Image (tube, coloured by chain):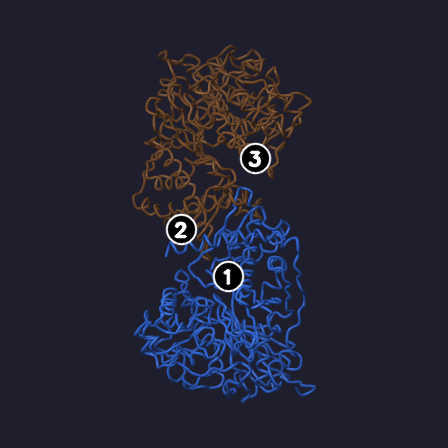
Chain colours: A blue, B brown
């Protein structure tokens, strides 16, 4: 890096409810300015149907809110605007968008402007449970390569192909109008760089490898025959949908004049290849080999990197994938996570707020609950719980399993039940770390980022005690945007490579939670109960299939 | 009965929180006047320790409150007071009281006035779980007669001998000062009739047979050798504690001048032999052979009678006993029940009231919860529950099992969880009826009495649907006191026998709930889930023993 570098980059972080633009100083990663904008149609839950677990974002929401967020961050900062040298993008995923041959999102065509199946199918949309099952059955049939080999052996309803297949069957009209399907993290850079050909959209290694079954060993995506075996309707797609993928330290192209004007930044600056929020968040938090970086929000996404030469042929069953270059270009990136984490606590609070939703705002009961739960011993008054209120992401993805509780009695109180739920989320975390280790990938340290990590020391301490590991908490609330900024700086040539950029720009650790040996010993028996309860809930789910 | 009989009797109903005196017309059972008094020291939960599940009543509370209740019922009714011809008594149980040789309750001696172990050990006291286990082990050892044969094969921690043994070990001083142990339902008549010798206390067939292992086939109580095998400390007792028992249609003696004055009624009137509240409640509700009368309150007590010649050698495993004459003199009386019923709903409401206990009074959330739960289909949104929040009374008593829930997800709401709990209590009810039937005792109709039966049509309807049986609800809120009055009238010679008294004085049925065939069909699969969840919870409890 040029000494005395006074340049800046923008990290754009597309979340479930809002997009955030953060202006980051290239020299040291400091977050200088930021603004948030929400998605106007999502705010009204248009195009969603919670009963079906259908969750869709209108692509117009992204364009409108992105411009507002960047404008907002730079408002009154003429000093910064002219010194922006690159843009990085992270988004939720797998959140695929159908596009026409010119790369335009289908819902941006008038004819499909109101069709939910022409929109971005948000990561948490669970309409494609049946299709995921079929993909798994086909992969296990022995008729083709097992394409799930590098995604933990189980394909999820939250992912790319399951969603494409679901739309193919449910809505042939929209499906046939789409020439291709593009992950949100690829669509935003394509928009910003003016791509006008669906086949020219730069594809992120991260999204392609973790969600679309892309792998160098397969020479890219699954074969056309495989798609046709899934359903002949997929023959409608021009295959392969793409061949090449790119890591996020590379540029996807340069900012168009139109978007430069909309943002108020210089035209022609590089836009880095996009990736998923948790992957970039891990980099923003300074991920090192064998440290598990956990984005602890409504759900968790757990990221680990390891050198390919040490991973060798090791395959980790039941996680969300292991992809060369998905997190950092020279490493295998592993992804895992829990389908609900903060959502577990929010659910319980919502239960307690029943009948007083107006008088008692969401989030206001949690501090007292937490305080009283913290005063109880491990195991509370004997209550046990599972964290699968939104199914299970890992280990061993299964959206049909549900949560359970045991050990309830007349003395069970709101704080003791809450404590059981907190412990359950920690046990779910432990199950993930144990899976990595039992499959031969050690977990040496843990770094936590995301809403829960900083807001709830109790939850983080229970995780440390249950997992018997130190947990460092990153100081920044915006590790994902910071990670995007690190890739932007790299793609813009401000550093020689992403490792140097990361070293200079990462968020420091503000606090380390150390495991308490006595608490850990107490949790050993409780973890065994968690596994027993889990086996029961799994069994119950299979029976009701 | 003398035609135009204008006599009255008093039913005294000793509950957990209050005693109620009801003045009942002999001619037709009409409840003419009543008053309630609470227990002053119990109100402050003195001598209780909820963490240990220790629940004790000071005997002085009974004397004080009983006088207040009778006085209250007769206040301003000089027309009634002089025409009272008998008193009947029903109480909770098994609620044994240690007494000295002169029959005085130990805690009424100054030296023991503050000693919880010298007081009435209330039915719901669970301090003697370990002792009950030992009694069961001894009964199954083959060294002695299996004295649990007529109490369902399992002795409970809520019962007489377990509690005596617990005090024997825990508090030798109090234990050695006690010459005998008297059930509350026997102690009150002994007090009212001036018994001054512990060995002369008239023992109720009901309490002795269902809780103290008394049976004609054993020639009374278990042997002294059996007691010594349990624990040599029991050698301190003068055995047998009693030999004879009496059914409640008989008189226990006549009212002393002192108590006649305290009550303001004629001295010398007969006091009927006492019995447990649910037994007398069943008679007050007009129990017929093979009808299951369910007292649905915080817990349930389920009573059934059958002619001895039809029962023959049939033994019903896992219930709370089958005793000749316990309910009605010419029948075998069967007792079963659920350890928590209304308590399940109260627990859930308490959970929801957390943090707003002062603003929201107990009971005020239930009507809306019930309305919203009722609007959901059987099974709610997939939630499942067990009703064992206070352990399980029957079938197969086990105070170590706890409740559980399954099928929980982010869409689970307070009403859907509440519905699962209501269904769980109905499944628990069904399990009891099924046990009777699988053991050869048909359940032909069901009559419900008690707080829940009249207050919650939703709960009663779900029970009818789950059990696929009509449930008649008695019109009186005071069936127990009315049953006590029926026995009082019989003991006072107002009727030739209790059957005639019952026919004249019973409470009519005010409403009949008919099962809905479609709902019942839906509950079949849910009941299978209930049994599965139960097997799991049972297994979890055994492992943590």
Mark 3: few/some/many CA within 10 Å (<14, 14-19, 20+) = some
**Rendered image: mark on residue A340:** 1
Instruction: Classify the position of the N terminus of chain A by image quarter.
Output: bottom right
> In x, y percent, where is residue A401?
44, 58
| Circles 1 and 2 on the same subunit | no
- In depth, the one of B225 and A533 nearer the eye is B225
- The answer to which quarter of the image holds residue A115 is bottom left
* Label 3–label 2 contact, CB within 8 A: no
- The location of residue A110, given as percent across then percent down, is 36, 78
Numbered disc 1: what chain?
Answer: A
Element type where label 2 sits in the image: loop
Camera sees residue A218: yes
Q: Residues within 10 Å of mark 2 (few under 14, many from 20)?
A: many
Residue picked out by circle 2 = B380
Query: Whole-percent x and y of residue B407?
Result: 44, 53
The residue under the point 35% across, 82% down is: A238
At x 37%, y 35%, the residue is B433
SS state under label 3? helix
- Residue hosting label 3: B130
* Mark 2 chain: B
Tell me the quadrant of the picture where the C terminus of chain A can be found: bottom left
**Circle nearer the viewer, 1 or 2:** 1
- Image: A267 above or below B241: below
Look at discs 1 and 3 and give the one toward the viewer: 3
């Amino acid at each position: 890096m040029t000494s005395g570098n006074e340049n800046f980059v923008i990290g754009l972080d597309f979340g479930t409810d809002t997009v955030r633009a953060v202006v980051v100083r290239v020299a040291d990663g400091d977050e200088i300015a930021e603004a948030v904008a929400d998605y106007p149609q999502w705010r009204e839950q248009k195009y969603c149907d919670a009963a079906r677990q259908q969750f869709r974002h209108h692509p117009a929401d992204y364009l409108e809110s992105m411009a507002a967020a960047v404008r907002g961050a730079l408002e009154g900062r003429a000093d910064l605007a002219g010194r922006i040298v690159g843009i990085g993008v992270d988004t939720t995923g797998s959140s695929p968008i159908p596009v026409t041959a010119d790369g335009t999102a289908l819902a941006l065509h008038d004819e499909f402007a109101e069709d939910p199946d022409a929109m971005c199918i948000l990561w948490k949309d669970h309409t494609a449970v049946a299709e995921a099952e079929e993909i798994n059955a086909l992969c296990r049939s022995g008729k083709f390569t097992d394409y799930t080999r590098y995604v933990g052996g189980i394909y999820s309803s939250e992912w790319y192909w399951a969603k494409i297949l679901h739309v193919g069957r449910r809505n042939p009209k929209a499906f046939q109008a789409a020439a291709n399907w593009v992950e949100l993290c690829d669509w935003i850079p394509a928009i910003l760089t003016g791509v006008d050909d669906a086949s020219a959209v730069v594809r992120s290694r991260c999204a392609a490898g973790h969600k679309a079954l892309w792998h160098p060993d397969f020479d890219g995506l699954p074969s056309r025959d495989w798609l046709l075996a899934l359903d002949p309707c997929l023959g409608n797609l021009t295959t392969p949908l793409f061949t090449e993928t790119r890591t996020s330290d590379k540029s996807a192209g340069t900012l168009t004049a139109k978007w430069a004007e909309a943002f108020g930044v210089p035209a022609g600056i590089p836009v880095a290849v996009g990736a998923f929020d948790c992957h970039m968040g891990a980099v923003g938090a300074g991920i090192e080999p064998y440290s598990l970086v956990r984005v602890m929000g409504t759900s968790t996404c757990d990221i680990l990197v390891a050198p390919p030469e040490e991973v060798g042929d090791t395959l980790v069953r039941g996680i969300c994938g292991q992809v060369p270059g998905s997190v950092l270009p020279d490493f295998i990136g592993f992804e895992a996570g829990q389908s609900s984490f903060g959502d577990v606590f929010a659910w319980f609070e919502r239960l307690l707020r029943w009948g007083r939703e107006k008088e008692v705002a969401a989030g206001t009961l949690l501090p007292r609950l937490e305080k009283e739960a913290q005063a109880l011993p491990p195991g509370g008054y004997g209550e046990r719980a599972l964290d699968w209120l939104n199914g299970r992401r890992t280990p061993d993805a299964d959206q049909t399993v549900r949560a359970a509780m045991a050990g309830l009695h007349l003395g069970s109180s709101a704080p003791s039940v809450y404590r059981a739920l907190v412990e359950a989320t920690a046990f779910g975390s432990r199950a993930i770390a144990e899976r990595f280790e039992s499959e031969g990938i050690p977990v040496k340290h843990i770094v936590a980022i995301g809403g829960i990590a900083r807001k709830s020391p109790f939850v983080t301490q229970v995780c440390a005690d249950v997992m018997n590991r130190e947990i460092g908490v990153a100081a920044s609330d915006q590790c994902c945007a910071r990670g995007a900024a690190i890739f932007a700086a790299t793609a813009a040539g401000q550093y020689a490579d992403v490792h140097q950029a990361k070293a200079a720009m990462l968020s420091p650790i503000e606090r380390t939670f150390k495991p308490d040996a006595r608490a850990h010993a107490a949790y050993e028996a409780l973890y065994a109960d968690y596994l027993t309860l889990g086996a029961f809930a799994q069994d119950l789910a299979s029976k009701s299939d």
